[in-house]
Amino acid sequence: MIEEAKRSFDRQGFMKTLGAKIISIEKGMVKIACEKKESLTQQHGYFHAGVITSIADVACGYAALTTMPKGSEVLSVEFKTNLMKAAISDKIIAIGKVVKTGKTLVFCEAKVTDDKEETIFATLQGTMICIQTKPTE
Amino acid sequence: MIEEAKRSFDRQGFMKTLGAKIISIEKGMVKIACEKKESLTQQHGYFHAGVITSIADVACGYAALTTMPKGSEVLSVEFKTNLMKAAISDKIIAIGKVVKTGKTLVFCEAKVTDDKEETIFATLQGTMICIQTKPTE
Amino acid sequence: MIEEAKRSFDRQGFMKTLGAKIISIEKGMVKIACEKKESLTQQHGYFHAGVITSIADVACGYAALTTMPKGSEVLSVEFKTNLMKAAISDKIIAIGKVVKTGKTLVFCEAKVTDDKEETIFATLQGTMICIQTKPTE
Amino acid sequence: MIEEAKRSFDRQGFMKTLGAKIISIEKGMVKIACEKKESLTQQHGYFHAGVITSIADVACGYAALTTMPKGSEVLSVEFKTNLMKAAISDKIIAIGKVVKTGKTLVFCEAKVTDDKEETIFATLQGTMICIQTKPTE
């Protein structure tokens, strides 16, 4: 499902708006990077919490999709973001991982760090749901 | 603090990127509207969960700021989004309200609806922190 | 499903331990009351956050069950508690309500108040899942 | 602050009710164990989500307290529990860890496992607040 995840990511207009890119993808893990530009800032000039959350959610969603059966699609049910530190770096990386898969629900966690993956700016915990679609033959 | 909230909102580059606008602001309550464009979509062409969360967080943050003492600034500590329904409308509205104020922390809730404020697409619950800055005299 | 909810509640050993009682139940809404005793306290002698969360979760779970088809059981997927104020009263009431039902998931909210339902001590937002069991005929 | 954390734990009537015990405590990390008895069960005879959450919250709270200055007390601001699997074991262990300390807020995570710390039943993410009290001299 890695190719399906990439294709689905490419259909997200909002990821283009953020300039977000998948930099690593394997079964159960997706990394997304995003570079700072003024169009992504909050009132003090740092990365907006909404940007941080968006790439963390998407990293989790596609990490979940890579573990689902062929013909599945993924939607977010809920997620929670804890903002631990102002995201003052020039680039942020969201690392989304699957913690537990089920038939219907997949539970994931992400952290958002600087570009060395050292300083943690935020964490996200979320539940993803597997939507069965008919395989397009 | 209503004018301070508006000014702070105007400094958020990311709100311009979303085309988000404050359409109502009073003590403890802020409404933000956002119109659909392809640059804000997820893979099925609906509003992205990240957009929904971003305007809900900002509505809560500025609702909180309107209740804080002069010279304060607001930051999000954490928020949780429950996504109840695909946001299929052409415009979404986030209504953020203060539930409980404290000396340091303010707890807020938001809902994100269609433009008639009838169908609820998502809810957000969040904790905001009051940062005391020296009043700029 | 109101009778099923009551019977399931009665099977919870932990609700007996808390001395928790359903004081109101209708489709989509359940109220549970709990009286203070030393066995339910935190370090300052108030209701423990774990007690508050437990009755709020159960109120949501059974509110959800009342909306599910016959033969269903309910499990909690996730919940978040915001603790707004020390629960200093002698009795607390959790009011759980269904916000949105789906085929599989039901999203609920609860508040926990004093016995006049005036002062809010905590809120909880949670996702419940419907487990289909074979109807016992 | 390790002795203060132990003493505060011992003042919690609710921890006695659960039969919960601190089995390990060091700066930034606390483990709490709890054995199954009928008084702690949900409707299917497993550990109640409320019990799981209670010991995870307390493990986080005291993990946070060990990192705070002398004379501090700790309160939970909010926490979120994800329930990944029915807690079918005879004993559960909550491992609470500090993720990020601040002057006022401490962000923590816990997992609740079987007694071999292998199977994860639930995770909790929470924010704790440091309350400054006058040192008791």
Image (spheres, coloured by chain):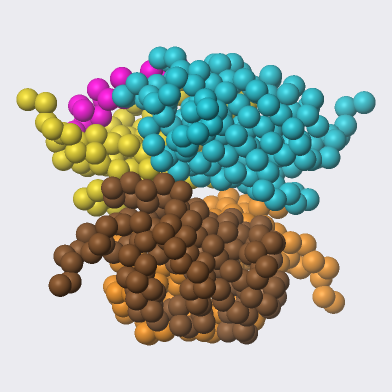
Chain colours: A cyan, B yellow, C orange, D brown
Q: Quadrant of the N terminus of chain D?
A: bottom left
Of residues B19 and C84, which is closer to you in this image?
C84
C115 drawn magenta: no
Quarter of the view holding residue D7 = bottom left
Is A38 situated above or below B127? Answer: above
Q: Which residues are magenta?
A: B1-17
**Left/right of residue A102 with respect to residue B112 in the rendered view:** right
Q: Quadrant of the C terminus of chain D?
A: bottom left
Q: Looking at the picture, how far across and down is residue C123, in whole percent?
A: 42, 58
B7 drawn magenta: yes
Q: Looking at the picture, how far across and down is residue D51, in whole percent?
A: 54, 72
- Considering the whole magenta stretch, tell me its main secondary structure: helix
Q: Residue at x 59, y 16 (%)?
A: A16
Quarter of the view holding residue D46 = bottom right
Q: Residue at x 16, y 40 (%)?
A: B69
Q: Looking at the picture, how far across and down is residue A2, in whole percent?
A: 78, 29
Q: Looking at the picture, how far across and down is residue C131, in whole percent?
A: 74, 61
Of residues D20 and B42, which is closer to you in this image?
D20
Quarter of the view holding residue A11 = top right
